[in-house]
Image (cartoon, rainbow, N blue to C red):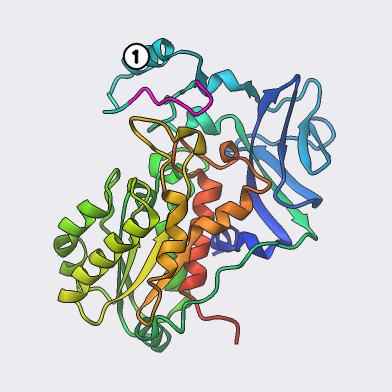
Amino acid sequence: MKYLEEYLTPVWEGKMVYRETFAMIDEDGACSAPFLYQPERILKIESYDGMQSYELGKDCIVENGRLVLTEGSGIPHTGWDMFYHATEEEARRELESRSEGLGFGPVATTDGRFLNLSAIGNPEYMTRWQIAVTYETGDAWKGTKPESAERYLPRFFKKALSGEPLTIVLYGDSISCGCDSSGLYGIQPNQPIWPKLLEESLRAAYKGQIRMVNTSVGGMDSDWAFDHAMERACAYEPDLVLLGFGMNDRCSGEEYKEKTRKLRDRIRSSCPETEYVLIATTLPNDLTGTAPFWFHAHQGEQAEALWKLQEEGCAVADVQNVQRELMKKKRYFDMTGNLLNHPNDYLARIQGQVLDTILKPGKR
């Protein structure tokens, strides 16, 4: 399937980069956004939804590792005021204008403004200002690369490679539900959520019947996960459980590690042969580390904490450190669907790429 190849080719492989996203935000009288890699040949420049195409030289140029809009460019762009309110009063008026309440807000930012929450449940508010560029590069990935977890998941790989039936349970929060992939909302380009991409890729790679059950619920944390583990994980007698909590845990990395250990052990008590992948969640907007909601809290400590739990029967999918490497070049606004804590199609694909790499054999 061609789209699987494009969506799940790991970003850390370089060479061909598919639909990298760029937020077109005016600043100091200009509009530009950074490339992850230095492009050698631009193949396609299109709107986020894929419905419009743009021309290099006419609508934009490449300059100093950035995509720069030309004067009179046809590419939509906007200012930072689209994403922030100057006052709490403005932020409250926005919340009051919503047809459905959020149950939280306003959200102050660390630089004294308030986040515009219009993109919550409506990613087009953000993504209409993002474009997608497909290009070739000769640059190499500088960070660590995810690797196959074959040595840590012997039962899963033995069954998968021999074509035996497998049941995988994905148990996590809104990121595991697929927020904010376009396919979740039925909007263009209608990219399937990353769990669906992963499921299709595993079915294509292994001969056996793979059943993937997604029991994730948005907004939940590790304490809730522990309380509901029996009906949302154990009841399916899974061969493998992918644990995807953490975004809504405001505790320290060490406390999160112990909560994850406790959750894993609760499932083990009922399913002793089950193996695990612990997902280090994507990172939220670091401007939201403010009272009373603390959307950005200690999530950045979670990857290091989870690595301490890796052992036979339990592997780590470190999405977080891949995102950190991306953000040495890219900005959070280039990769978000809701401005707050959800990935857009591009970053969601990268989460799928990490999991896909973990659950495939390494190079032999």
On the image, the x and y values in percent for residue 75 come to 69, 28
For label 1, the residue is: 97
Asked if residue 87 shows in the view, the reply is: yes
Report the span colored magenta.
105-112
The image quadrant of residue 314 is: bottom left
x, y (%) of residue 19? Answer: 63, 48
Q: Residue at x 34, y 47 (%)?
A: 174
Residue 282's place in the image compared with 138, above or below, is above
Which residue sits at x=50%, y=38%? 286
Residue 197 shows in this picture? no
Where residue 133 appears, x then y in whole percent?
69, 44
Give residue 332's position: percent from left, percent from top: 57, 40
Question: Would you identify the image quadrant in which residue 279 lies?
Answer: bottom left
Q: Magenta part mainly helix, strand or loop?
A: loop
Q: Amino acid at mark 1?
A: Ser
Q: Residue at x 82, y 30 (%)?
A: 58
Residue 174 belongs to the span the image colors magenta = no
- Could you say whether the residue bearing mark 1 is in a helix, strand or loop? helix
Q: Is residue 109 above or below residue 280?
A: above
Q: Residue at x 51, y 64 (%)?
A: 354
Q: Quadrant of the C terminus?
A: bottom right
